[in-house]
Image (cartoon, helix red, strand yellow):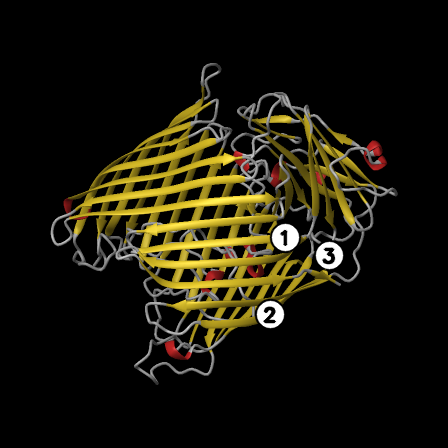
């Protein structure tokens, strides 16, 4: 069955033909190949409203040869003047840039694909698409592009090597859509129409790219990516001598088939990965930070998206942070039209001073497409401590001999994306933990232009353990309903408005209420894209364990104590098309132990486009509590300077002052992309005590890698 037989936008068809004349990727439409290419030039408005044709014209053409897929987009200007961009930084913020992006469903499954594009200054965008339209921007690969600017238009041209993407051999129809964001008119548009409640990346709404013959079968596709690294670090607190390091390592990417990839790594290093944005932690449970390391990213959804937000049986950041990785292998991709596979085996090194044994992580995931866009999945995880017996050395931390997880899930996605949902079952196997060692959760969402209605429930047993996952809470049952209603005035400055209600109710395994919250808010979106939200939330918590409400270790509230609070809030987000942008979130209300909390979070940005982007993130928490805590306040300030001299040379400096952790962190990173996917990094890191101001530790690293295609 072809795509056309089962797609919402099957009538939107673009024919692509082989070119026998060279295409120079220079942002010019003068190549003969473009004169012969078919045009996609009738775009539909997605935002502010999805009921008319686009007002800003866009002309897209595609062709191919034996090595590359080519695309050119002529983005005409309705309002002349300077294009609105943040910087030349790769993988920019979509809503803050004039940009053109396209999406390809190379497997005709309306679930997985790729996206490429650029902003109007030439900064590249690339990502993998999963779960029908979510983009993983951490993915990075080899391709070339050019952008030229003119008085009445800007032009994007790109060459995507067939070896860069994965696709099914022999098929002559792919899903495709093109998306344009024009900030001066506040218009977002797409070639195949997409309802405004969905992102333009939604693969359920792609049109059809019709090939005159099946895309070329590539020969051996092997990439070797070696790196060399040198660096120096010093611990000033312990007054140890400077530590010098020099390392080499290797990554390799081998295409087993055109849609199945094998990644290998030996002694990887991730020192160039951008630092996490810190937050003031007043939560009772562990915080979540996303994976950014390149080795773990391709097809990461088949591993990491099993489960939901707070029940992730596998979380790759558990591997190799603070512990060297010896080697690893990942096989991932499509077996055929209906089957996807992910298999991973990684081994970490032994750390004597912590008593940490060498550990092996093995993961197998299978996914089977059913119906039009839904799937069923299987996951097995095995974390094993090698040559280790717990209890032999009680002077050091103890680790489990093994931890295993086995799970199944069903992912629902209707053909028009209006209905989505998930059902899941997991069981863990850990020595000494039996009974109540399983998980069940289910969710369903209805999302139309007017209504968004969802339901989610969870059960996590008290003995369920996912040592290679992220499950911050055990021993509970949760119910989580939510509903939103949107209204769309036909005239005036307000684009949409409406109420939102959400709640979460937690019970222990005997169905005794332990905590809950209820939130009511009202969202107003202006036609110029400014948004305002007012909210009220009611919280109740019975502490299941002693808890320090300041997370500073000063003292703890007793287990079993009960706390309730009312909180009022206001949020505002500015126009993304301005050089000066801002957002602010304010909360005031009750807190633990009949205390009060005032919370302020703001993000301010200014861009000297396209070369310099300044940002300042600030959060302030003021707590009024009884003794022994008393009045406590925490500042967290994080200025960021992003200097992009070209779209290949970046300098990013990030400073974070965290009053709660009593730390000042400085991280400066220079990146020179001297060839596609090949980089030179210089990374400098400092950590300081705020009072008295003194250095804790300092490090400087130089890393060079080269993407070598065989």
User: How far is mark 1 from mark 3, CA to CA?
Assistant: 27 Å
User: How far is mark 3 from mark 2, CA to CA?
Assistant: 26 Å
Q: Tell whether 72 sits left or right of 234.
A: right
Nearer to the camera, 30 or 299:
30
Give the quarter of the image for residue 378: bottom right
Q: How many marks?
A: 3
Q: Tell whether 279 sits left or right of 222.
A: left
Callout 2: SS: strand
Looking at the image, which residue sits at the far left?
A: 627
Nearer to the camera, 578 or 65:
578
Q: Tell whether 203 sits left or right of 23.
A: left
Q: Which mark is residue 673?
A: 1
Q: Which mark is residue 258?
A: 3
Nearer to the camera, 12 or 232:
232
Which quadrant does the N terminus fall into? top right
Q: Are marks 1 and 2 in contact (CB under 8 Å)?
A: no
User: How far is mark 1 from mark 2, CA to CA?
Assistant: 19 Å
Q: Are marks 3 and 2 in contact (CB under 8 Å)?
A: no
Vertical arrangement, residue 624 with respect to residue 180, above or below: below
Callout 1: SS: strand
Residue 509 placement (x, y as % from top left): 29, 57
């Amino acid at each position: 069955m072809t795509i056309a037989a089962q797609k919402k936008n099957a009538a939107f068809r673009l024919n692509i033909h082989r070119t026998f004349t060279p295409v120079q990727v220079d942002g010019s439409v003068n190549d003969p190949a473009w004169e012969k290419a078919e045009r996609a030039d009738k775009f539909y408005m997605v935002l502010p409203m999805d009921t008319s044709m686009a007002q800003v014209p866009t002309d897209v053409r595609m062709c191919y040869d034996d090595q590359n897929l080519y695309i050119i987009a002529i983005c005409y200007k309705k309002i002349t003047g300077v294009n609105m961009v943040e910087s030349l930084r790769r993988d920019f913020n979509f809503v803050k840039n004039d940009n053109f992006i396209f999406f390809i469903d190379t497997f005709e499954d309306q679930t997985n694909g790729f996206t490429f594009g650029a902003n109007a200054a030439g900064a590249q965008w690339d990502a993998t698409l999963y779960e029908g339209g979510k983009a993983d921007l951490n993915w990075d690969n080899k391709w070339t592009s050019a952008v030229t600017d003119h008085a009445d238009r800007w032009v994007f041209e790109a060459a995507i090597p067939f070896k860069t993407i994965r696709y099914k051999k022999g098929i002559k129809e792919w899903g495709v859509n093109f998306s344009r964001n024009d900030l001066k008119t506040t218009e977002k548009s797409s070639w195949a129409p997409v309802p405004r409640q969905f992102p333009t990346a939604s693969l359920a709404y792609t049109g059809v790219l019709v090939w005159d013959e099946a895309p070329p079968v590539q020969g051996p596709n092997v990439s070797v990516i070696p790196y060399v690294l040198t660096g120096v670090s010093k611990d000033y607190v312990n007054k140890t001598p400077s530590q010098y390091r020099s390392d080499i390592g290797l990554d390799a990417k081998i295409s087993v088939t055109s849609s199945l990839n094998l990644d290998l790594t030996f002694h990887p290093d991730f020192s160039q990965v951008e630092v996490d944005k810190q937050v003031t932690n007043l939560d009772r449970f562990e915080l979540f930070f996303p994976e950014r390391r390149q080795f773990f990213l391709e097809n990461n959804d088949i591993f990491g998206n099993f489960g939901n937000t707070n029940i992730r049986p596998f979380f790759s950041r558990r591997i190799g942070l603070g512990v060297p990785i010896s080697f690893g292998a990942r096989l991932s991709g499509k077996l055929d039209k209906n089957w996807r596979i992910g298999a991973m085996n990684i081994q970490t090194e032994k750390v004597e001073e912590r008593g940490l044994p060498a550990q092996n992580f093995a993961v197998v995931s299978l996914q089977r497409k059913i119906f039009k866009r839904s799937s069923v999945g299987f996951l097995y995880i095995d974390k094993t401590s090698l040559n280790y017996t717990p209890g032999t050395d009680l002077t050091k931390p103890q680790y489990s001999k093994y931890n295993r997880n086995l799970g199944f899930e069903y992912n629902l996605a209707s053909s028009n994306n209006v209905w989505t949902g998930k059902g899941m079952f997991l069981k863990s196997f850990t020595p000494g933990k039996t009974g109540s060692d399983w998980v069940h959760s289910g969710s369903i969402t209805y999302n139309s232009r007017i209504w968004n209605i969802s339901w989610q429930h969870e059960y996590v047993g008290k003995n369920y353990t996912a040592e290679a996952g992220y499950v911050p809470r055990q021993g509970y049952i949760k119910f989580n309903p939510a509903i939103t209603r949107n209204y769309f005035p036909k005239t005036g400055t307000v684009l949409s408005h409406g109420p939102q209600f959400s709640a979460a109710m937690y019970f222990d395994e005997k169905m005794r209420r332990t905590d809950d919250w209820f939130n009511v808010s009202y969202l107003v979106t202006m036609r110029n894209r400014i948004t305002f939200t007012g909210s009220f939330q009611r919280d109740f918590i019975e502490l299941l364990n002693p808890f320090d409400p300041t997370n500073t270790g000063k003292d703890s509230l007793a287990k079993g104590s009960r706390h309730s609070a009312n909180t009022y809030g206001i949020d505002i987000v500015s126009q993304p098309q301005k050089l000066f942008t801002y957002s602010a979130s304010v909360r005031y209300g009750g807190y633990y132990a009949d205390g009060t909390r005032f919370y302020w979070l703001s993000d301010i940005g200014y861009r000297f486009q396209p070369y310099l982007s300044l940002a300042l993130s600030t959060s302030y928490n003021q707590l009024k509590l009884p003794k022994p805590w008393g009045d406590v306040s925490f500042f967290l300030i994080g200025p960021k300077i992003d200097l992009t001299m070209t779209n290949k040379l970046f300098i990013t400096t990030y400073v974070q002052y965290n009053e709660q952790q009593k730390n000042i962190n400085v991280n400066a990173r220079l990146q020179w992309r001297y060839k596609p996917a090949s980089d030179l990094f210089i990374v400098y890191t400092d950590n300081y005590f705020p009072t008295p101001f003194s250095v804790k530790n300092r490090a400087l690293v130089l890393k060079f890698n080269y993407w070598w295609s065989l």
